[in-house]
């Protein structure tokens, strides 16, 4: 696996350092400590393929104008036999370097040689990374926020894998705590409604049909005047269906038992169905987890108590009025917070502390990455402070905070009602738009940016639809190759790739060569949106090249062969990018 951009950057750094060494030895610049300088890809490619700010950052140390330093460096820079053809000074002292024709030819050949591995790097050095995402409460179906979190988390894990990490995907199943208590209460109320005289009559009228039953007894908002529901329950249709299905199988079995026993029986029945549903729906979304970690295991192993005891023993927590408080103010927070209430119950954060201790200490992952909703902003510092107090390196935990999505149809915002349970779920979304579109769209923007999802555009077959646009570039190249072969033009195994010198060819090759570097940047910033942007730009550059440079009717047979191989390199690069995003690669559209 090779990264032509990184190789060029490394060689350029060496060229500059060697030149500075000569200048220092000759006394042209003082022997001062060299400030850190950057080598980057200029936004404007007319400014070269790579640019260095060495002269700018050395001006103070060398007591010389930056432009003069740049001129001195380039006088001593030895470019012969390197990847660079020439260099020039720009503006107040920037140094711009231009890559050789051979570098561009090698970049194309590199793609053809590495095939499906092209783009992979060793940046991560095999470090173990655990990416936790979605982790939706198993008390109901996944909502639109989970759809975005699923696409971001899954593609982030893939980016990390391609960047040389050993990445695992994990779903944290919240099968304990307040939400399960609320789940049990909701199920119990719906079940007891069915056991009532009015519930029995409705059940009889519907012939036992669950769907008809829900419509007959309850309105769209889950309410009925004869069956009032309190505020602290779930009103989704799924709760009604679970209660009705249990009743059909068990009738009045739970009517006369204690409330606690009834809730437990109903939760034990419904929760496994919901968890299996989560796994099924996520697989439909092409997300397969390595681990499903249940919160209940933390409680069963008594790890919540162990965490609190550790903090007390270390003097990082204290007892007051029967409750246990964490000394959060010792870690820069405004106030201390409760770990265990005076009634002996742990607060919601304690199982999370134990869970992350398990990730980073027990299972010894080098890094834990959580993809969470933006409403967790205040929760993250608390969690990190507690881990630090437990002796865990909290920098090993990184959190990607994700903004919510605004769905738009016909130019109007699609209203969502969480209370009534009528919100658009992951499943209803995937019934409406292609899975490819969902995965691509949810990775179009950085996770922390507001996002508008146009449902109409997602199904549109036009260049305005970004995923269609990228897939069309792939299909266009496949059609080109098929047409060439149909006309008796053989697809060459090799060609003189240095013949590729037109501006549109150079621009396209430069972008192809940047894939490993872009994957590395996406891994560093935890931002899969860099990859969707890369794919869109690649499709754009290919279409521009194809429209400007004839492949079939190239001026010479040798140039035609070189352009065919360039098209093959683009095709391979598109396939690899779409594979990384787990999006299909149609050969015809």
Image (spheres, rainbow, N blue to C red):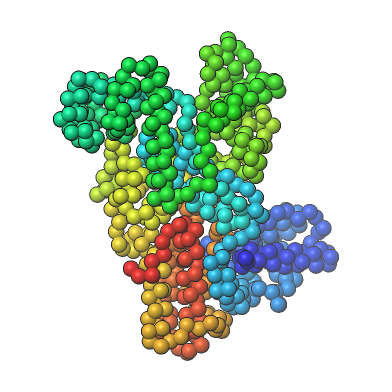
- What residue is rendered at 50% in x and 67% in y? 573
Query: Taking 334 as reference, is 355 above or below it?
Result: below
In which quadrant will I find the N terminus?
bottom right
Horizontal side, residue 236 vs residue 133: left or right: left
Query: In the image, residue 474 lies at what x, y percent?
Result: 41, 69
Query: In the image, residue 386 lies at what x, y percent?
Result: 62, 28
Quarter holding residue 390: top right
In this view of the protein, which residue sits in the foreground, 58 or 457? 457
Please, which residue is most extreme toward the left here?
205
Visible residue check, residue 14: yes
In this view of the protein, which residue sits in the foreground, 490 or 333? 490
Query: In the image, residue 484 lies at what x, y percent?
Result: 40, 83
In this view of the protein, which residue sits in the foreground, 363 or 101? 363
Horizontal side, residue 395 vs residue 140: left or right: right
Visible residue check, residue 381: no
Query: Taking 85 as reference, is 409 above or below it?
Result: above
In which quadrant will I find the C terminus?
bottom left
- What residue is rendered at 57% in x and 21% in y? 339
Query: Taking 350 as reference, is 475 above or below it?
Result: below
Query: In the image, residue 41 lies at what x, y percent?
Result: 58, 62
- What residue is rendered at 80% in x and 55% in y? 32
Query: Taking 212 as reference, is 340 above or below it?
Result: above
Quarter holding residue 103: bottom right
- What residue is rendered at 65% in x and 53% in y? 126
Quarter holding residue 23: bottom right
In this view of the protein, which residue sits in the foreground, 50 or 212? 212
Please, which residue is most extreme toward the top here?
321
């Amino acid at each position: 696996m090779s990264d032509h951009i990184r190789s060029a950057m490394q060689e350029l750094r060496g060229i500059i350092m060697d030149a500075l060494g000569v200048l220092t030895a000759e006394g042209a610049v003082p022997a001062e400590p060299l400030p850190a300088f950057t080598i980057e890809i200029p936004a404007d490619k007319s400014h070269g393929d790579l640019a260095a700010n060495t002269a700018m950052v050395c001006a103070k140390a060398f007591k010389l104008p930056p432009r003069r330093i740049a001129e001195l460096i380039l006088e001593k820079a030895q470019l012969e036999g390197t990847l660079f053809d020439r260099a020039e000074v720009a503006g107040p002292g920037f140094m711009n370097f231009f890559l050789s024709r051979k570098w561009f030819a090698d970049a194309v050949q590199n793609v053809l040689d590495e095939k499906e591995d092209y783009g992979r790097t060793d940046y991560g050095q095999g470090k173990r990374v655990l990416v936790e995402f979605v982790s939706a409460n198993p008390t109901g179906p996944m909502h639109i926020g989970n759809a975005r979190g699923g696409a971001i988390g899954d593609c982030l894990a893939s980016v990390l894998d391609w960047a040389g990490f050993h990445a695992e995907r994990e779903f944290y199943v919240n099968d304990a705590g307040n939400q399960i208590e609320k789940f049990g209460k909701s199920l119990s109320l719906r079940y007891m409604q069915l056991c009532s005289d009015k519930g029995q009559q409705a059940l009889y009228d519907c012939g036992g049909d669950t769907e008809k039953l829900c419509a007959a007894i309850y309105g769209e908002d889950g309410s009925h005047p004869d069956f009032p529901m309190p505020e602290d329950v779930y009103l989704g249709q799924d709760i009604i269906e679970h209660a009705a299905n249990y009743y059909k199988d068990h009738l009045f079995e739970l009517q006369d038992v204690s409330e606690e026993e009834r809730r437990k029986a109903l939760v034990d029945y419904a929760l496994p169905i919901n968890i299996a549903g989560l796994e099924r729906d996520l697989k439909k979304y092409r997300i397969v987890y390595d681990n499903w970690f249940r919160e209940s295991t933390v409680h069963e192993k008594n790890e919540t108590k162990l965490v609190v005891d550790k903090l007390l023993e270390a003097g990082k927590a204290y007892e007051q009025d029967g409750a246990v408080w964490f000394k959060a103010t010792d870690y820069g927070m405004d106030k201390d917070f409760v770990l265990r209430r005076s009634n002996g119950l742990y607060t919601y954060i304690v199982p999370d502390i134990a869970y992350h201790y398990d990730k980073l200490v027990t299972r010894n992952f080098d890094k834990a990455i959580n993809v969470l909703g933006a409403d967790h902003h205040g929760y993250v510092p608390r969690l990190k402070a507690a881990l630090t107090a437990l002796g865990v390196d909290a920098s090993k935990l990184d959190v990607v905070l994700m903004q919510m999505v605004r769905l738009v149809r016909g130019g109007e915002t699609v209203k969502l009602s969480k209370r009534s349970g009528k919100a658009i779920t992951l499943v209803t979304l995937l019934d409406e738009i292609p899975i490819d579109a969902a995965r691509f769209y949810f990775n179009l923007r950085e996770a922390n940016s507001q996002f508008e999802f146009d449902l109409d555009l997602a199904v549109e077959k036009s260049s305005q639809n970004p995923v269609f646009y990228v897939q069309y570039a792939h299909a266009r190249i496949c059609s080109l190759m098929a047409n060439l072969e149909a006309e008796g033009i053989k697809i060459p195994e090799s060609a003189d790739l240095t013949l590729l010198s037109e501006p549109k060819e150079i621009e396209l090759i430069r972008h192809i060569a940047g894939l490993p570097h872009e994957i590395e940047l996406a891994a560093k910033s935890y931002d899969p949106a860099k990859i969707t942007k890369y794919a869109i730009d690649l499709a754009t550059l290919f279409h521009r090249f194809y429209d400007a440079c004839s492949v079939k009717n190239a001026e010479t047979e040798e140039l035609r062969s070189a352009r065919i191989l360039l098209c093959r390199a683009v095709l391979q690069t598109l396939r690899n990018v779409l594979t990384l995003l787990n999006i299909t690669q149609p050969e015809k559209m």
